[in-house]
Image (cartoon, rainbow, N blue to C red):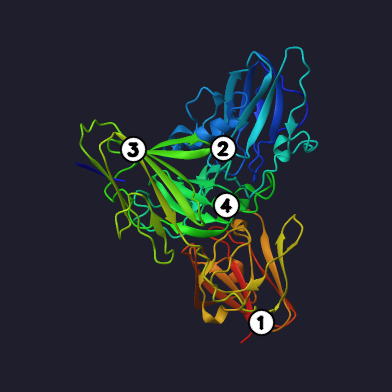
Amino acid sequence: MRRLSVMLLALAGAPLVTGQDPFPIGVIPGALRYDVSRFDVHVGDRVTIRFQNNGLMPHNLLVTRPGKVDAVMLAAMALGGDGPARDYKPQTDDLLAATPILQPGDAHLLSFTAPGTAGILGYLCTFPGHGTIMRGEIRVLPGGTELGAPLRFGGERAPTPDEDRLARSGASAFPLGTEDEPLVMRTFLPDPGLSDEVLAHHRQGLDAKPYDVNSGLDRPGVVKAIPGLPAAIAVNFGGRLSYAWDTVECRLLYAWVGGFLDMTDYWGAGAGGGRKSFDYVPALQGSLVYLATGPHPMGAEIEPRYLGYLMEGGTPVFRFKVGPFEIRERIAPGDGPFEIACDFEVISEADFKGGGVDVVFQLDYSESLRGRIASEHLLPDTTTVQRDCDSTRFSLRVVLTGEERLPPPQPFADLPRAGLVATARRVVTGDPVVPALGIQAFAPGRTIFSDREYTFDEVPEALLGADHVPTRNDDKLDGRDVSWQIEVSGPATVWVLLDSRVEAPAWLTDADAPFTRTDLVVTTSGNWRYQAWRRDVAGSSTTELGPQSGGSFYAIAVTPKR
C-alpha cells in the first residue's frame, strides 16, 4: 500500500521606415503603457525595434503572431517560479521576437521578419501583472500601401477612442471576470495572515539599498522588501468567488467573495492611467471566506513541484508533481454560498499491479472561519478525505464551505481629530503649491502617506487624535527642495515623526526655533520606528518643514499646546 498525501518617449511624426534606423519604443514613466500603441510595416519587411525601458519598474517586449497576445500572456503566467530565470518568455511558436526583462534605464534591440500576409501582430509586456494592459499592435499591410504614422502617447496628440483599442476595451484598475469567463491574473498578492506552516517553501524577502539608475550606484537609505506573495495566481469568477493559488506551495491559499482586486496603486486609475504610488501589492475587494491553515493537505513532508496550468472550459487546472504523482486541481464556485469546489485528478507514473493508493487530505480550518468540508470520501468525524484506489488515474471532489469574515472593527474609527490645522501645503520648487488632502485623526491603523498603504501601529497616548497630515513617501526620492507649510488656528504643538534610520536634517535641529527630540516613538506596519520631535507654536502661525532623503519620509501631527 502506498500513501499519497494529497495577470519610451519618442517624437510623434513620420511612418516607420524599416531596414534603416531601429524603430524606438519606450514606456510612459509611472504607467503601464508603451508610448507607442500601434505602428505599420509592410509584409515581408525586416523590422528592428529598439525598446528603451525609461519607466520605473522592469519591463519586456514580446511580439506575437496575429491573435496570440492572450495565449502568450497565459503561457508566461504559467511559467510559475521559472518565470524570472526565463525573462517571463514562454517557449511557444506564437512568439516572433522578444527582449529579456529590462531594468529601468536599459535598452535592447530585437529584429524579426514581418509575415508574408497582411494582418495584425501584437506586442505586450509579460512581467507579472502587466500583460493585461501593457500592449500594442503592429499592422502588417500589403506592399505598396501607404504606412500610417505611429500612434503615440506623449506626442503631438493623444489617440482618440476610435484609434486606441485599449481605451475602448474598458480596462480599469478594478478587473473582474465572470462565472462563464473567469479572469486569471499573475501579480503580487496580499498576505491576509497566512502562517509559516502554509508558506513553508517560501523564503523571506530582504530589504535592500536604493539604486540610482542614472549613476549606477546605491543611494543612502533602505528599500523595504515587497510585503506580498510573489508567486500566487489570482482567479476571479465575478462577485461570487475569487481565490489565490500559490505556485510555490502548490495549494489554495485563500478565497474571498464580493469583488476582486484594486490595482490602482500598481496600474493607475483608468485605462493606463498614471500610478499614484509605487505599491506593487493590490488590495483585496470584498470579504475573506477561506484561509488555509496548517501544512500542505498532502503532508508537511512533501516537496511539490509546479508544472503550470491548463485552461479547460475557461477555468485553470493547476498541475504539480509530488514524487511519482501528478496532481491536477481545478477550483470553481460550488452550488451554495461560500462554497469552493476543488476537483483533484491524480495521475501516477507507476503501475501499481493491483496495489492500493491512499489519497489523504487533512484540511484544518481556523475557528474564526468555522469552515466545513464535504466529500464522498470524507472519513467520519474528521477533516480527512481518504480514497483507496488501484488505478493509476483517479479523481475526487472536495467542497470547502467558509463563512464570511468581515474586517475587525476599528477601535479608533470614531476618534475625532484636534481640528487645529487650518491649511497644510506641500511646496516643491518649480511646481504649483499643493494643499494636503485627507487630514485625519492620528491613530493606529490609519494610513501614513498619500502614496503608500503603510499604517501606524503603536501610537503614544499623547498623539492620539492629533491632526495627521498625510505626506508623500516618494518625496524622499525626488531630489528636489520639498517643504511643508503647516498653518494652525490656535496654540498648538507641531510634531515631526522622523524615521529612526535617518539622520535628523539640519532644519529640524539648527533652526532659529529648533524642534526638540522627545522620548515618544511611533511604530508602523512596515516595522519602522518613528522618533517624535516637537515644537510649540502660537495661534494663527505657520511652521515650515524642510526636505528629507533616505528612509521613509517624515509624518506630521498637530496637537493642542499643553
Of tags 1 and 4, the one toward the viewer is 4
Give the residue type at disc 1.
Ala
Along the viewing direction, whichever of 48 and 250 lies nearer the viewer? 250
Q: Earlier in the sequence, mark 2 or mark 1?
A: 2
Around disc 3, counting alpha carbons within 10 Å, would you say few (fewer than 14), some (14 to 19), or many (20 or more)? Answer: some
Q: Pointers 3 and 4 in contact (CB under 8 A)?
A: no
Around disc 1, counting alpha carbons within 10 Å, would you say few (fewer than 14), some (14 to 19), or many (20 or more)? Answer: many
Along the viewing direction, whichever of 377 and 18 lies nearer the viewer? 377
Residue under label 4, please give it. 260
Give residue 394's mark. 3
Around disc 4, counting alpha carbons within 10 Å, would you say few (fewer than 14), some (14 to 19), or many (20 or more)? Answer: many
Give the residue type at disc 3.
Phe
Q: Earlier in the sequence, mark 3 or mark 4?
A: 4
Q: Pointers 1 and 4 in contact (CB under 8 A)?
A: no
Q: Earlier in the sequence, mark 2 or mark 4?
A: 2
Q: Quadrant of the C terminus?
A: bottom right
Residue under label 2, please give it. 59
- In x, y percent, where is residue 460? 51, 78
Of tags 3 and 1, the one toward the viewer is 3
Give residue 492's mark. 1
Give the alpha-carbon distance from disc 3 to disc 4, as whole Å. 33 Å
Of tags 2 and 1, the one toward the viewer is 2
- In x, y percent, where is residue 450? 63, 61
Give the residue type at disc 4.
Phe
